[in-house]
Amino acid sequence: MPKVLVPLAEGFEEIEAVSVIDVMRRAGIEVVLASLDERMNVRGAHGIEIQADRSIQGIDADDLDMIVLPGGWGGTKALAADERVQALLKAMDAKGKRIGAICAAPFALEAAGVLKEGYTCYPGIESEIKTGGFTPQNDVVTSGNVMTSRGPGTAICFGLAIVKQLVGREACEKLRNGLLAGYCADC
């Protein structure tokens, strides 16, 4: 089964993290939650704490199929500033492995130099990004090995798009039907 890393930084957007993690786990994807330091409880932007599985220290891109960054401006800035996250993003990209980011998190991809031409993000964040091809009309955009999504309201669709990429169309459609998420077009 595919393995996905979700790094959690203080100030992450809870809806985006939990929804995407839940959808991936329902599809049988192994999801590893990693904190940026030794503290395993990470507080989100709205005060909800999530317990990480481990620290990001020592995680190797060779052991992963994908890395997915939740948004939230505080968390995104921390992900963009963290050398280990940035190194993982660069290594994943160099190996052609999948990278995902939702809401403000494409900013962290930009910092690593891995954001591709053709992306989406939370409205207004594109002004912080130099990479071209902002596509505001799409909830989920895939460009090469990079998948981006707009924000909290598109998190279920983003999770389903990840499932489609990693597990397949049939799993995506079955899950979409079970979640009553017919509004998500990407299955």
Image (cartoon, helix red, strand yellow):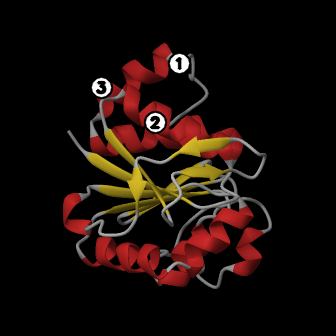
Mark 3 touches mark 2? (CB < 8 Å):
no
Please, what secondary structure does the residue beneath circle 3 have? helix
Query: What x and y, as percent, mark residue 55?
Result: 41, 60
Query: What x and y, as percent, mark residue 83?
Result: 47, 82
Tell me the number on the disc at residue 160: 2
Of discs 3 and 2, which sits in the foreground?
2
Query: What x and y, as percent, mark residue 167?
Result: 27, 37
Please, what secondary structure does the residue beneath circle 1 have? loop
Of residues 96 and 87, the one drawn nearer to the viewer in this rendering? 87
Q: For this view, does 64 lie left or right of residue 116?
A: left
Q: Residue at 72% x, 59% y: name it.
A: 122
Q: For this view, does 159 lie left or right of residue 89?
A: right
Mark 3 → mark 2, Cα distance in angstroms: 11 Å
Mark 3 → mark 1, Cα distance in angstroms: 14 Å
Amino acid on which disc 3 is placed: Glu
Mark 3 touches mark 1? (CB < 8 Å):
no
Mark 1: give few (<14), some (14-19) or many (20+) Cα within 10 Å. Answer: few
N-terminal of the pair, mark 1 or mark 2, is 2
**How many discs appear?**
3
Q: Residue at 34% x, 50% y: name it.
A: 4
Mark 1 → mark 2, Cα distance in angstroms: 10 Å
Viewport quadrant of the C terminus? top left
Figure check: 173 above or below 100: above
Amino acid on which disc 1 is placed: Leu
Tell me the number on the disc at residue 84: none
N-terminal of the pair, mark 3 or mark 1, is 3
Residue with the mark numbered 3:
170
Q: Residue at 30% x, 69% y: name it.
A: 58
Residue with the mark numbered 1:
179
- Is residue 187 visible from the viewing direction of this image? no
Please, what secondary structure does the residue beneath circle 2 have? helix
